[in-house]
Amino acid sequence: MKKKETFWILGTICFILIIILWIFGIDGLTLESVTDINVHDTYYVIANIHLIVLLTTLVFFGVYLIRMLKRNFKNLTANLIFMISDLTLILIFTFLISLVNSIRAIPTTAEYEVFRGGIEGSNGNGWNAYYVLLTIQLLLIILLIISGIKTGLNYKQAE
């Protein structure tokens, strides 16, 4: 690995650490720390480590996507780091899709329709979140395939 790549990796890690310390503080780096998210009257408690992994993956994905496209897939180290972060994002979205499916199945509401004489069920719009996450995951898979093919072609030509 070249010196420049080492500086890019260290710079990205320092940038991530600064963002994490700015968002969570020094106490947010402990394994027991959690973040409470209040949506209407429901509290979601998420361990900070999950948010840190997501933030780290997104920053690596963004930085190395720009580097990979700027160098036109010619930098092997940047391409490999991008593909690893892309695979991690695909795994995160797989977990989110299963989470959305489990949450979507629970909250159904029933409204009593006086004029129709019965109860009508409403499932809400959980399918919208499912389709958005699935579309993002498919785009990530397509991007991984394209970057893998381009990296392989450039690496084969370099030898």
Image (tube, rainbow, N blue to C red):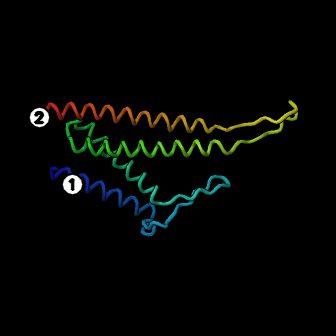
Can you tell which mark lies on residue 53?
Answer: none
Residue 111 place in picture, x, y as percent? 79, 39
Q: What residue type is labelled 2?
A: Glu
Q: Residue furthest left?
A: 159
Residue 51 place in picture, x, y as percent? 46, 55
Q: In this view, does 73 lie above or below 88?
A: above
What residue appears at the point 38 percent right and 49 percent down from the top-left corner?
57
Residue 18 position by quadrant: bottom left
User: What crowding class fits label 1: few (fewer than 14 Cα within 10 Å), some (14-19), or many (20 or more)?
Assistant: few
Whether residues under marks 1 and 2 lie with C-beta atoms below 8 angstroms apart, the answer is no
Q: In this view, does 150 lie to the left or right of 23?
A: left
Judge by depth and name the residue closer to the eye, 99 or 56.
Answer: 99
What residue appears at the point 64 percent right and 37 percent down from the top-left corner?
125
Residue 157 position by quadrant: top left
What residue appears at the point 42 percent right and 69 percent down from the top-left corner?
26
Q: Is mark 1 on a helix, strand or loop?
A: helix
Residue 135 place in picture, x, y as percent? 48, 33
Q: Which amino acid does label 1 sit on?
A: Phe
What residue appears at the point 31 percent right and 57 percent down from the top-left corner?
13
Q: Is residue 53 left or right of residue 4?
A: right
Q: Earlier in the sequence, mark 1 or mark 2?
A: 1
Q: Identify the residue under disc 2.
A: 159
Can you tell which mark lies on residue 7?
Answer: 1
Q: What element carries label 2?
A: loop
Residue 105 place in picture, x, y as percent? 64, 42
Q: Is residue 9 above or below residue 116?
A: below
